[in-house]
Image (tube, grey):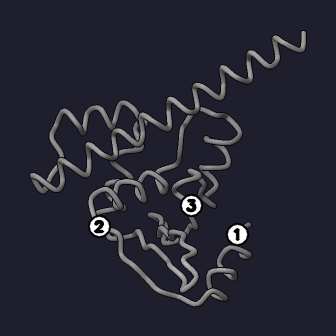
Amino acid sequence: MMSLDLTNLNHSQQKVKEAQELVEHLMLEVKNAYTLHGKLSDDLLSLLNFTFQGLLLSALELVEKQSVTKIVSPSGRALFQVVGASGTPYTCFARENYCSCPAYHFSVLRKEDHMMCKHVLAVKLSEAMGKSKSLSVSDAEVTHIIMSIE
């Protein structure tokens, strides 16, 4: 019985790793396409839309509205804030695929039917496309932002 649980755990970990590798590959494709052509091809957009289950258009809107800000402190700590469609700022950690929004907690953590929310996808896309705003703040300000995550 115990080996079955470990087998399931290893299988789940492998699926997560494969999904992360897919996302990294897609973001590299986005970066290359945007660098070379200043836009994303229809084929790449279709693949992104299929992969991210309909979150793509909302994420691209956030990118185009320049809603993504990379916040960096002197010590090198970095996080992202994305102003959602409602005007609410959400804190994101892109490498960890974490967002403070309710959709992340429901669809990613609870239901497990999405890899990420539209805010994290917007962060990844804006970074790949070079469209993130940047803001330098003190270490204390970054700590405050992190501590205020609900």
Distance Cα–Cα, label 1 vs label 3: 12 Å
As drawn, the residue found furthest toward the front would be 75
Density class for disc 1 (Cα within 10 Å; few <14, some 14-19, many ≥20) is: few
**Which of the marked residues, 2 or 1, is nearer the chain's N terminus?**
2
20 left or right of 30 in image: right
Which disc is residue 93 wearing? 3
Residue drawn at x 40%, y 38% is: 54
The amino acid type of the residue labelled 2 equals Lys
**Along the line of sight, the residue nearer the viewer: 107 or 41:** 41
Which disc is residue 12 wearing? none
The amino acid type of the residue labelled 1 equals Ile
Asked which secondary structure carries label 1, the reply is loop
Q: Comparing marks 1 and 3, which lies closer to the viewer?
A: 3
Which disc is residue 149 wearing? 1
Asked which secondary structure carries label 2, the reply is loop
Distance Cα–Cα, label 3 vs label 2: 17 Å
The amino acid type of the residue labelled 3 equals Phe
As drawn, the residue found furthest toward the left would be 37
141 left or right of 80 in image: right
Task: Establish if 17 lies above or below 102.
Answer: above
**Which of the marked residues, 3 or 2, is nearer the chain's N terminus?**
3
**Which of the marked residues, 1 or 3, is nearer the chain's N terminus?**
3
Question: Where's residue 36, x and y in %?
Answer: 11, 52
Residue drawn at x 29%, y 67% is: 131
Which disc is residue 131 wearing? 2
Query: What is the quadrant of residue 10 in the picture?
Result: top right
Asked which secondary structure carries label 3, the reply is strand
Distance Cα–Cα, label 2 vs label 1: 25 Å
Residue drawn at x 56%, y 60% is: 93
